[in-house]
Image (cartoon, rainbow, N blue to C red):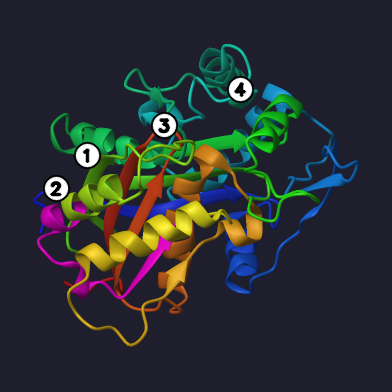
Amino acid sequence: MSTQPLAIVGSGMVTGVGLTAPSSCAAIRCAVDNFQETRFMDAGGEWIVGGSVSLEEPWRGTNKLIKMLACVLTECIKIDSQLNLADTPVLLCLAEEDRPGRLPDLENRVFIGIQQELNTRFHEKSAFIAQGRVSITLALQHARQLIYQEKLPNVVIVGVDSLLAAQTLKSFEERERLLTSQNSNGFIPGEAAAAVLVQAAKGQGGLTCNGLGLGMENATVNSEDVPLRADGLVAAIRGALSEAGCDMGATDFRITDVSGEQYAFKETALALLRILRQRKVFYDLWHPADCIGEVGAAIGPVMLAVLLAAGQKSYLMGNDILAHLSNDAGKRAAMMLTYRPMGAA
C-alpha cells in the first residue's frame, strides 16, 4: 500500500441534477437525469440536448463558472467549522488550454473571480491544473506533496467546466463526437462543479486514495491511423495498482469518466482484457456522466464525491475501487481507492 495515502473527507457538488452533493449523489444513485433541449441547434436543425445547471439567475460564461465554484467550495469546507480557504491550498481543475470554445484567459479570470466572489484570498500554495478530465489525478499528486512533504493539514481540490458553448459544441459536432439528431455515437454535453477536501489518511477509515497512475495513449479518439490497444490506460491502471500494492482482481468495481462514445467503452474493455487475470462473475462499471452529461474537468471530483456518498450511505458495490479517466490529448489517469467504515483500521 502507498506510504502516502490520501483521505477524501468532504465534498461539494453542483450539477444538472442537484445543487448540493447530497442531492446530486441521490439523483445519480437513482439514475435520474435532467437532460433538456438547450438554446443550441445541431446541423440537422434540431435542438441539442444537454445537462445544464439551473442557478437563481441566468449567468453565463466565466460568471457562471465562478458562481458554481463558490457554491461547491462553501459546501465542501462546511465539514469543519475551523477550516477557511485562506489557510487551505485550493487546486483548481480546468479544461485543457487547446479545447475549442475555451474561454480566453480562463485560469486568471476564474482564479481571481472566485476569490472576489468569496471575499477571500487563497493560500499561496494554491494552483490551477488545466488538463481536463485527468486533472484530478495530477491534483491528487500535488496534494500528496503538499500534505506529506510541506506538512499542510488540508487541501481542497475543485473542478469546474462547461461544454455548453456554441464554439465547443460546433467543434465536437463537426468531429462527430456530439450526440445529435444525426449522430447516435456521441456524448451529451453538460456543466458542473465539484470539490473534495483531502487530508492525510491516518487509518481512521472512510474513502482513501492509495495509488495513482498516469499513461499516454497514441491512439486517441481523434486518431485514424493508429490501432487502439489501450496502452496508455493499461499503463495508468498498472501504475495505480502498483502504488497500492494490489492487482486488478482485488478491486470490486470500477468508476470512470466515460460519457457515451463507443471509443471510451472499447478502450475500457481492452484495458480490462489485458490486465484482469481473475474471473469475476460481476464487475460493475459506474459512469456518472450518464446522469449529468460530459462535464470535462469537473468529472474527477464528481467521481470522488459520488464514491464518498456511496460509502457513507452503504451502497458501494465493494470496498476496493478502481477509477480511471482520459482526456482528448491522450493522457490517461487511474486511481486506486478504498472505503472502510469510520474507525476501522
Gap in Å between the C-alphas at discs 3 and 2?
29 Å
Gap in Å between the C-alphas at discs 3 and 4?
15 Å
Report the front residue among 138 and 37.
Answer: 37
Bounds of the magenta segment: 240-256
Number of other residues with Cα within 10 Å of mark 4, as a class: few under 14, some 14 to 19, many 20 or more: some
**Residue annotated with mark 4:** 102
- Considering only order in the chain, which callout, 2 or 4, is on the residue closer to the N terminus? 2
Local secondary structure at mark 2 = loop
- Considering only order in the chain, which callout, 2 or 1, is on the residue closer to the N terminus? 2
**Residue annotated with mark 1:** 144
Local secondary structure at mark 4 = loop
Q: Which mark is residue 80?
A: none
Q: Are marks 1 and 2 in contact (CB under 8 Å)?
A: yes
Local secondary structure at mark 3 = loop
- Considering only order in the chain, which callout, 4 or 3, is on the residue closer to the N terminus? 4
Report the front residue among 178 and 128.
Answer: 178
Going by the image, does 182 lie left or right of 334?
right
Gap in Å between the C-alphas at discs 1 and 2?
7 Å
Please state the horizontal and vertical placement of residue 23, each as a whole percent of the image.
65, 62
> What's under tag 2, amino acid-wise?
Gln
Please state the horizontal and vertical placement of residue 216, each as a whole percent of the image.
28, 37
In this view, the mark in front (1 or 3): 3
Going by the image, does 253 lie left or right of 76?
left
**Residue annotated with mark 3:** 329
**Residue annotated with mark 2:** 4
